[in-house]
Image: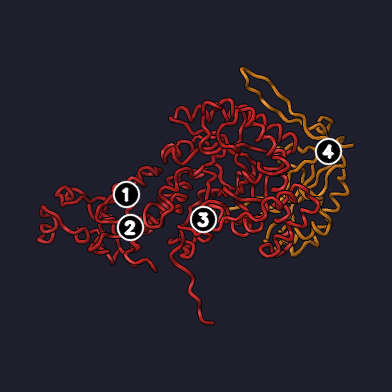
Amino acid sequence: MTEQRDRYQAGVMPYAQMGYWDPDYEPLDTDLIALFRITPQEGVDAIEAAAAVAGESSTATWTVVWTDRLTACDRYRAKAYRVEPVPGAPGQYFSYIAYNLDLFEEGSIANLTASIIGNVFGFKPLKALRLEDMRIPVAYLKTFQGPPTGIVVERERLDKFGRPLLGATTKPKLGLSGKNYGRVVYEALKGGLDFVKDDENINSQPFMHWRDRFLYCMEAVNKASAATGEVKGHYLNVTAGTMEDMYERADFAKELGSCIVMIDLVIGYTAIQSMAKWARRNDMILHLHRAGHGTYTRQKSHGVSFRVIAKWMRMAGVDHIHAGTVVGKLEGDPNVVKGIYSNCRDSLTQRNLEHGVFFDQDWAGLRKVMPVASGGIHAGQMHQLITYLGEDVVLQFGGGTIGHPQGIQAGATANRVALETMIKARNEGRDIWNEGPDILAAAARWCAPLRAALETWKDVTFNYQSTDTADFVPTATVA
Amino acid sequence: MRITQGTFSFLPDLTDDEIRAQLDYAIEQGWAIGIEYTDDPHPRNCYWEMWGNPLFDLQDSARAMPEILACRETHRRCYVRVNAFDSTRGFETTRLSFIVNRPAEEPGFLLKRHELEGRHIQYTLESYAAQAPAGRRYE
């Protein structure tokens, strides 16, 4: 009794003593677990900092309040239960925090994130804070719809199996009229791509209003389908200023017979979940462009890692997500990208510190998200792309299609021939990582567009140091 | 025109040896092999006729290849494809699907535009070949 009286005396008390630090705590199967990278201010103890993060992301405020005593407060307090230094990063600590399931509303990414990345990210005693990974309990996953279509059903609808899908983003991304824009779409699809894509910032601008774009693009899609006998698609970006506008655009896309629509990450978690439900109701594939993520995912010390965003998006329910290329122009360390891809595609993602994956994650039957690799990739890298990214991925060659010296159709054909050649060789048991360039060269002997593509982009690589890398490297063992 | 459905339609038609190599790959993954044929190649015609049940528990291409040859012989004027089916959890679907026979001439598709209100067009694809009754196409 005296103990309780002391605990609830008015005044300020360290978070660790308020019950937000419990090194003996064993997380329940139904707990959410968050792993934060914390950088305490000078002189702030790491355990106290971890407890503060637990407190500020759950029930605490800066001072003791007696009203806690009207609640089962111990249950609602998040508990930091493990703190360890980050290897090779002095002053940074990994802190594991467990949250009881009752803290969260079912089926709401908005609610989940308002706690986990809410006020706590501005908390003064920390210099920086990064959400590295989360373990979402099956019980909570089961309250989410997840991807409206998923990889398996998408492939069955498109009738495309055994190889990555091919796409391209229309370029220039801004300025084309609807009619000229549709021309690019038709050429690329007829030449051999499966999809063409609106860019993230193509919505409804003075040079091209959305209805015009939708009408011309669907003419292009259907014409290309007739010319090839294949199912084709164009991701019509329905991103707009209000939900009402987005629904209007999505409904029109459906009326025109499009098999896919697209949204941007910047529309927000709730809007994404609404569109996911719309897509499930309307048999539509939902593509997500991760516009904006680089502002908070790229730096290792502060923000939210993309692997967490990818998890949230699988829960929120998107079918495609841009998730890194490794070899292209955008950020993407090979190991970190592997970790993100496994969170998109696995039924059970296994802990793998080298890939930045800190927890086993049972996906509870949630459908799988197709990762999209886009940005600065070309046909000459096909063997590397397939080796790094596997088969269930959309490879998007925008410049690598439209910038082809013999035209857009030739660019698309070059990519498709390179892809099919490489998959065939891989299946035949060839070592594509090492023999890739020879395999491409052999196909280029009978395929002029591929020959021109290899010649044009032969030396293009983007070899820059990644900023977002895994903290754990394999240690050599003595044999 | 050349219909480009299937995993390898942009490559020259596969030789029998190349087909065997793909079968061996699929079988090594533990997948079942199905053979299907059709004279209606509309991209949304997902139910081609089955050349018997899929072949399960194969060791190599030795059992599947004669079936492919027989189907191709009987349905020389049809499209024939090989599907590999994966029964593991999380997939339970086709993992590879490629054409191993196609008619000598492929007339392709008519794109029909049904003009509606405003500039709205409803599109329909019609296979020229499928305008003849089933069994009398590609003759």
Instruction: Report the chain holding disc 3.
Output: A
- Judge from the rendering whether residue A115 lies leftward or rightward of residue A298; answer left or right: left
Mark whose residue sits in front, 1 or 4: 4
| Residue wearing tag 4 | B106
Please report the residue visible at 79 percent of the width from the left and 56 percent of the height from the top. Answer: B19
Q: Quadrant of residue A434?
A: bottom right
The answer for how far apart the CA atoms under marks 1 and 4 are is 62 Å
Residue A252: x %, y % from top left: 56, 27
Mark whose residue sits in front, 4 or 3: 3
Residue B92: x %, y % from top left: 62, 52
Question: Are callouts 1 and 3 both on one chain?
Answer: yes
The answer for how far apart the CA atoms under marks 2 and 3 are is 29 Å
- Report the front residue among A436 and B133: A436
Instruction: Identify the amino acid type marked 4.
Output: Glu
Which residue occupies the extreme right position in the image? B139
Chain identifier, colour red:
A
Q: Which mark is residue A332?
A: 3
